Image: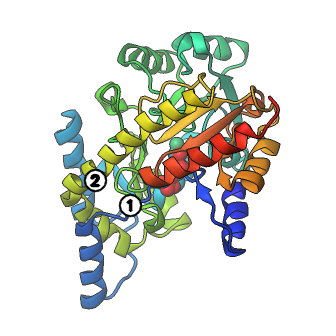
Amino acid sequence: MDVVARANQAVAEGRDIVMMCVGQPGSPAPTTAREAARSALDHGRIGYTTAAGIDPLRRRIAQHYMDKYSVELDPARVFVTTGSSAGFILAFLAGFDPGDRVAIPSPGYPAYRNILRSLSLEPVELATREDERWVISADMLREAHSKKPLNGILIANPNNPNGTMMKPDAFHELMQTSAELSVNFISDEIYHGLTYAQPEICALEISDECFVINSFSKYFCMTGWRVGWMVVPENMSETVDRLQQNAFISAPEISQIAALSAFDGIDEMERVKQGYEANRTLVLDRLSRLGLKKVHPIDGAFYAYVETSRISNDSLALSARILDEANVALTPGIDFDTAEGKSWMRFSFAGDNATLVEGFDRLDEWLSRQNL
Ligand SMILES: Cc1ncc(COP(=O)(O)O)c(C=O)c1O
């Protein structure tokens, strides 16, 4: 977000910046969602809802699990949240006690460790490796647990910053191992729907004893509406309901109304996804032409995580230089991996194709001026 702030500042100063740093779609929410919100504004009062969310939306989300994953889900286990960000807070508060240790991937989404720490929980960053295809394996979980017991594990599949996904067998094995070790499993499925290489598996296909976190932010292009959802184990419903009542009261009603109609906009969102697929091809080609060939497998999401040691081993300084000198905003890997991220950068391809072409042209030109 600091990079975005600096880039926005540059834009405010009148500079033309190509934003390849933000993890948000360039397209708006589905037309159906925007129409529903407009009509709600015209016809009613927007108020609090019940803590768990409006019933039609909870039922529609449960239906989505049947349609997409053939999972039968009781809507009573569905909670509508203020983005998936609120879902993490609720899951962490419900699932853990102060001092508990929660494994997360490195590289991974930085808010995991920051939220965990702010709730007096201990993030245990497990460094993913190329020989494990950059994902946490069951063996890695066992090894970490044997050194010092863990209470939880949180993974995103596809992951941010790399878009990398676990193979179905590895996912099964990881969930089974966490159950054997009595380690609470939290599955961040925010990038479901945006996969290119293999279909996504939902943790609920394997077990009911897990928290599943999801959001309307990415697939449905609704970042600013701040609406997401979580599915909780049956015995957690009451706890999560009370936490939600006290911490957030409810997710914004207008966003819930829009989210319900977003499910009618799937065709439109599939066209948006086709745009990311074209962007992904372009990004891989242009990175390779820049001599940046070490890229984590982009199985899903809209990011390329790229080794940039050929240019610099200080990704923070590199992102500042590229912003200042090439007018392109990229995210330094150090945000996602405090140990190795100095040599990596994240390129987001959530925007439009022409802007990406312009961004890579600028990077080409800038690199040709460097003495490498
Ligand atoms: C992996 C992952 N999880 C969760 C979020 C938070 O999303 P939101 O709170 O908008 O649902 C993000 C945002 O970039 C993310 O990348």
Q: Is residue 55 left or right of residue 330?
A: left
Residue drawn 38% across and 82% down?
Answer: 47
Q: Is residue 327 left or right of residue 71?
A: right
Q: How is the image coloured?
A: rainbow
> In the picture, residue 278 is in which quadrant?
top left
Expressed as whole percent of the image width and height from the top left, the position of residue 238 reads 41, 52
Residue drawn 57% across and 37% down?
Answer: 161
Whether label 1 lies within 8 Å of ligand 1 gets the answer no
Residue drawn 31% across and 86% down?
Answer: 41
Expressed as whole percent of the image width and height from the top left, the position of residue 116 reads 67, 44
Expressed as whole percent of the image width and height from the top left, the position of residue 76 reads 29, 51
Q: Nearer the viewer, residue 329 or 185?
A: 329
Expressed as whole percent of the image width and height from the top left, the position of residue 227 reads 42, 62
Residue drawn 36% across and 39% down?
Answer: 277
Q: Secondary structure at mark 2?
A: helix
Judging by the rendered image, the residue that carries numbered circle 1 is 27
Amino acid at dot 1: Ser
Q: CA distance from mark 1 to mark 2?
A: 9 Å
> In the picture, residue 327 is in which quadrant?
bottom right
Q: For label 2, count other residues whose C-alpha is less than 10 Å away and answer few (under 14), some (14-19) or many (20+).
A: many
Q: Is the Cβ of the residue at disc 1 closer than 8 Å to that at disc 2? A: no
Q: Earlier in the sequence, mark 1 or mark 2?
A: 1
Q: Nearer the viewer, residue 114 or 274?
A: 274
Q: For label 1, count other residues whose C-alpha is less than 10 Å away and answer few (under 14), some (14-19) or many (20+).
A: some
Instruction: Work out whether 372 lies above or below 260.
Output: above
Judging by the rendered image, the residue that carries numbered circle 2 is 269
* Numbered tag placed on residue 300 in the rendering: none
Q: Is residue 306 left or right of residue 220?
A: right
Instruction: Work out whether 199 lies above or below 21.
Output: above
- From the image, which quarter does the N terminus lie in? bottom right
Q: Secondary structure at mark 1?
A: loop
Q: Nearer the viewer, residue 242 or 183?
A: 183
